[in-house]
Amino acid sequence: MNDGELLELAAKAAGLWENNAGNKSGWECNYPLGWNPLENDGDALRLAVKCNLSPPYFNWDTEVAGYIGTNPYAATRRAIVRAAAEIGKRMAHEQSAAA
């Protein structure tokens, strides 16, 4: 999954994308311009709070092992976005199953 897909799913989990039948794709972006929890500590923290994520939720061994040596802050942001993206993926699956 690329970074754009991770961010889209994370935004859905945080309620920053809404299902909108008037839109071709059915989804409408409601996150602020420049929102990027992969790059911004504040955006990542707000995402974690919005999704009720806590550090035990992350699988640190697999999610951040490749990043921790170079930049532990980037590793933490990526772990938050990946965890939120998993929530967003489940939400999208549940919505498509209900339709």
Image (cartoon, rainbow, N blue to C red):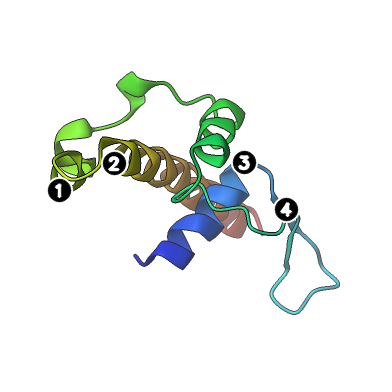
The residue indicated by pointer 2 is 75
Please determine whether, in this image, residue 47 is positioned above or below residue 52.
below
The residue indicated by pointer 3 is 14
25 relative to 62 in the view: left or right: right
Q: CA distance from mark 2 to mark 1?
A: 8 Å
Q: Is residue 93 visible from the viewing direction of this image?
A: no
12 relative to 53 in the view: left or right: right
Front disc: 4 or 3? 4
Q: CA distance from mark 4 to mark 2?
A: 23 Å
Mark 4 and mark 2 in contact? Answer it, CB < 8 Å: no
Mark 2 and mark 1 in contact? Answer it, CB < 8 Å: yes
The residue indicated by pointer 4 is 32
The quarter of the image holding the N terminus is bottom left
Nearer the N terminus, badge 3 or badge 2?
Answer: 3
Q: List x then y, in percent, for residue 63.
A: 23, 42
Q: List x then y, in percent, for residue 4.
A: 47, 66
- Mark 2: amino acid: Ala
Nearer the N terminus, badge 4 or badge 2?
Answer: 4
- Mark 3: amino acid: Ala
Q: Nearer the viewer, residue 39 or 20?
A: 39
Q: CA distance from mark 3 to mark 1?
A: 26 Å
- Mark 1: amino acid: Gly
Secondary structure found at label 3? loop
Nearer the N terminus, badge 1 or badge 4?
Answer: 4
Q: List x then y, in percent, for residue 85.
A: 45, 48
Secondary structure found at label 4? loop
The residue indicated by pointer 1 is 66
Nearer the N terminus, badge 3 or badge 1?
Answer: 3
Q: CA distance from mark 4 to mark 3?
A: 13 Å
